[in-house]
Amino acid sequence: MIKIIDINFQNQKSAVGCFLIKKDKNIVLIETGPSLYYNKIKTSLEEINIDIDEIKYVLVTHIHLDHSGGAWKFAKNGAKIYVHPLGAPHLENPEKLIASASKIYGDKMDQLWGKVDNIDANNIISVDHNETINIGNIEIKALHTPGHANHHIAWKYEHNIFTGDIAGAKIDDGPVLPACPPPDIDLVKWEQSLDIIKKHKPKRLYLTHFGKHENISNHIQELKQELKVWSYWIKEKKDKILDNPSLVNEFNKFVYNNMKIKKIEDKLIHQYFAANPPYMSVSGLKRYWEKYG
Ligand SMILES: [Zn+2]
């Protein structure tokens, strides 16, 4: 059984999710959301008669705070946290992670994420590419999938892949859109990672932003296309619009148009923007072109 848990991030439905796998008595949680939403997960689990303290195995796709900001709370209850080797040091010592997130989110840190605490090294398990982990009779394979973040893992379970951010965001019937925050965006690696996902022929993708999607080859095609469109838009505009707020403004408009949404007050916009604020992608893609352009 796979349960999708909607944490209702910033009061938006279907913006940020976590996933519970249950097979007989074995339980695995994939993603934790920010620590601020721990109680939201607790309530969701109670609906299916699971006590949050029973969660002893947590897999995170990467260490961005919307995906694993709450992992330390589970670790305090004795859970093992499975993560990419490059992400592990940042769970143990989150100072750098907090500092770089503070650069992006400024004084909104607490309001967005809540506290970020360190995780004892004994509770952190680094997982290699193609490594299989067994939690009772639950077998999960790690697919290292850089592009959005260097330390990104997509987790494969049976015919499902939990894609974190590597398969982009698709909320309800909205478009497939990438999230390109600094500092690791790499469009070449991203494309290769999407090919890894495809190669495994999953029947379902579970997106942290958000939920289950089954039309996989179209999904991946749409994302690849959108990554090109976004990145070339930034490449072209970044030298013409030098002042950052104007560039972000223009990019917002471009994204609205691109989403084929007529009214700015459309609720889908709020859901997408809560999950992946476009200004992050402006700085992430600018940085990419400055590095590799
Ligand atoms: Zn994310």
Image (spheres, rainbow, N blue to C red):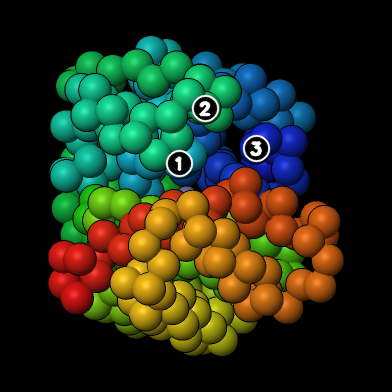
In the picture of the structure, the residue carrying the numbered disc 3 is 9
Tell me whether the residue at label 2 lies in contact with that at label 3, contact meaning CB atoms closer than 8 angstroms.
no
Q: Disc 2 versus disc 1: distance between alpha carbons?
A: 17 Å
- Residue 43 appears in which quarter of the rendering? top right
Image coords of residue 182 (percent x, y)? 31, 52
Identified at 64% across, 56% down, the residue is 272
In the picture of the structure, the residue carrying the numbered disc 2 is 108
Image coords of residue 145 (percent x, y)? 28, 64
> What kind of residue is marked 2?
Lys
Q: Residue 92 versus residue 74: which sits nearer the camera?
A: 92
- Which quadrant would the C terminus be assigned to in this image? bottom left
Q: Residue 188 versus residue 99: which sits nearer the camera?
A: 99
Q: Residue 281: which disc?
A: none
- Residue 82 appears in which quarter of the rendering? top left
> What kind of residue is marked 1?
His
On the question of residue 140 being in view, the answer is no
Q: Is residue 134 above or below residue 154?
A: above
> What kind of residue is marked 3?
Phe
Secondary structure of residue under mark 1: helix
Q: Disc 1 versus disc 3: distance between alpha carbons?
A: 11 Å
Tell me which label, 1 or 3, sits earlier in the chain.
3
In the picture of the structure, the residue carrying the numbered disc 1 is 67
Secondary structure of residue under mark 2: helix
Mark 1 or 3: the one toward you:
3
Secondary structure of residue under mark 3: helix
Q: Is mark 1 within 8 Å of ligand 1?
A: yes
**Few, some or many C-alpha atoms within 10 Å of disc 3 (few <14, some 14-19, many ≥20)?**
many
On the question of residue 96 being in view, the answer is yes
Q: Is residue 82 above or below residue 61?
A: above
Mark 2 or 3: the one toward you:
2
Identified at 29% across, 35% down, the residue is 100
Image coords of residue 76 (percent x, y)? 38, 13
